[in-house]
Image (cartoon, rainbow, N blue to C red):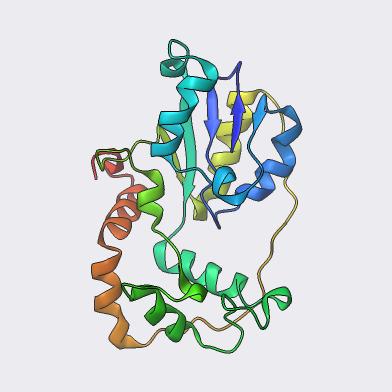
Amino acid sequence: MLVFWDARLVLLATPKTGTHALESALGNEADIAFRHPPFVKHMGFAWVNRLMPRIVGEKEWPSFRTVAVMREPLDWLGSWYRYRRRNDLVGQNNSTRDMDFSTFLKGYLKDSQPAYSRLGRQWKFLRRDDGRVGIDYLFPYERFDTLVDFLENRLDREIKLEQENVSPEAPLEVDPGLAAPLAKALEKDFRLYDALISGGDWKNI
């Protein structure tokens, strides 16, 4: 997560949405950079909204705006599945190397998720404590260039991104029988993403 004081902007790092590349490009220019550990780097909006007033000041915080990225929910899960197939996780309980995507998804849908599919929801990352979407500016991952344009304009600088954290390739075929359970489990994620990508009123999801 990066904080830019003069621009009054906070860039949240939604996991698996390309924000690591932005951190590499902009991290040295940020006034505050949360890089480690991962649960701090990837603070969700509700946590940010509680913590940042103590850091920047109660009177200053209302003038800040938050920006984040959201990825199509199934594509987001596919990115996690491929990421956990990497060589350094082989033999670990969170490795997905020896399973197909549908097995990963079945684990994700369990009430007690196994380590290899223990993940949250993008919607929960982006929401306020009251359950409403809290982010001021939300960009779809599939239109990352619009986010870069926004940041270049807001920060008054050119941004050049390098490709980083590329996950291993893997087939992402989904068992048709999982369609309904996934739609139910990720109902708010799909509604939010559909409104975002279609230009609908995503802030009131």
29 sits to left or right of 1? right
202 sits to left or right of 136? left
Viewer-side residue, 153 vs 134: 134
Picture residue at 48% right of the left edge, 64% below the top: 76
For residue 73, above or below residue 86: above
x then y, percent, for residue 123: 35, 51
Using the rendered view, name the quadrant where residue 179 is placed: bottom left
Which quadrant of the figure contains the C terminus?
top left
Using the rendered view, name the quadrant where residue 107 is placed: bottom left
For residue 1, above or below residue 143: above
Q: Is residue 50 visible?
A: yes
Q: Is residue 197 visible?
A: no
158 sits to left or right of 82? right
How many badges with numbers are in the image?
Answer: 0
For residue 95, above or below residue 165: below
Which residue is farthest top?
59
x then y, percent, for residue 71: 46, 57
Viewer-side residue, 105 vs 150: 105
x then y, percent, for residue 130: 24, 38
Picture residue at 75% right of the left edge, 51% below the top: 162
x then y, percent, for residue 63: 45, 16
Which quadrant of the figure contains the N terminus?
top right
